[in-house]
Image: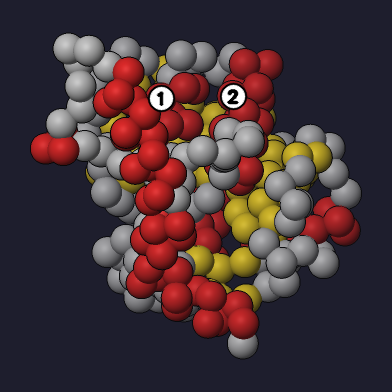
Amino acid sequence: MSSLLRNWVLAFVAPRPLVGALYLPRYLRHWRAFSSKARDDRPRVADSYPCLGDWTSTTPFDPHYFYQAAWLARQLAARRPARHVDVGSSAQTIAAVSAITEVLHIDYRPLKAELAGLRCMAGDILALPFDDASVPSLSCLHVIEHIGLGRYGDAIDPEGSRKAAGELARVLAPGGRLYLSVPVGRQRICFNAHRVFAPETMLDWFASLTLESFALVDDDGRFHPAADRAAARGLEYGCGMFEFSRD
């Protein structure tokens, strides 16, 4: 019940104005201190841009997206494919890996960006524009858990995630690699944000492929580059990273 209440409350108070209000007195003290020390370059109220929650002891980051991007970049740097296809992963991840190899990025909501080594196009993960067994290097990070929930304008489909997994497996070439990440832990549907999967579900859905490696971000945000799948079973919201191959 507390998780449900938290999810609904956060949905309506982002970016957490009540928390930011706690730091408003500090902002005003700093404004006065800066203004008293400045000479010609004094701040104006019309130009003010208060950032009330950024004073932290360490740099905050999202462990799932930070570590999965590092994981994919290292995998591609080690294998050096001539070309790589990504389906729906974050724009920041794709921008970085395009420095390693030529990347074709496919997304239901196409990325409108121009960058050397990167080509972007609109596409549907449920109907990828590739022949069977034709893509030698493929990634899809933190994507398939959303398919069928309507969050990004896609059609409602309770089987959406399973169908997306089937499409990724269909297009992977013999000898190729699929780099996949999904939320792992207690299996459930958090409508309409995402699904969370037991790791065994991914092994079942990708039974036609071979699991080469498994990495994990646990509930405490710690990265385990070579993890036992059993470690994911008791998690609430971890991130499992699966490297699959096709014989």
Choose the circle earlier in sequence order: 2 or 1.
Answer: 2
Q: Is residue 143 shown above or below 162?
A: above
204 horizontally vs 7: left or right:
right
Kindly check if marks 2 and 1 are in contact, taking CB atoms under 8 A apart as contact. no
Residue type at tag 2: Ala
User: What residue sits 82% from the left and 67% below the top?
Assistant: 234
The disc placed on residue 73 is: 2
User: What residue sits 72% from the left and 71% below the top?
Assistant: 186
Q: Quadrant of residue 48?
A: top left
Secondary structure state at the residue bearing disc 2? helix
136 horizontally vs 109: left or right:
right
User: What residue sits 87% from the left and 58% below the top?
Assistant: 230
Q: Residues within 10 Å of mark 1 (few under 14, many from 20)?
A: some
Instruction: Kindly give the residue lying farthest to the front in the view shown.
Output: 36
**Residue 70, horizontal then vertical, whole percent:** 62, 28
**Residue 171, horizontal then vertical, whole percent:** 50, 43
| Residue underneath mark 1 | 95
Instruction: Kindly give the residue lying farthest to the left in the view shown.
Output: 46
67 horizontally vs 203: left or right:
left
User: What residue sits 22% from the left and 12% below the top?
Assistant: 39
C-alpha gap between disc 2 and disc 1:
11 Å
Q: Is residue 123 visible?
A: no
**Depth check, front residue: 221 or 90:** 221
Q: Quadrant of residue 176?
A: top right
Q: Is residue 139 shown above or below 235?
A: above
Image quarter where the N terminus lies is: bottom right
Q: Residues within 10 Å of mark 2 (few under 14, many from 20)?
A: some
Residue type at tag 1: Ala
**Depth check, front residue: 24 or 73:** 24
116 horizontally vs 216: left or right:
left
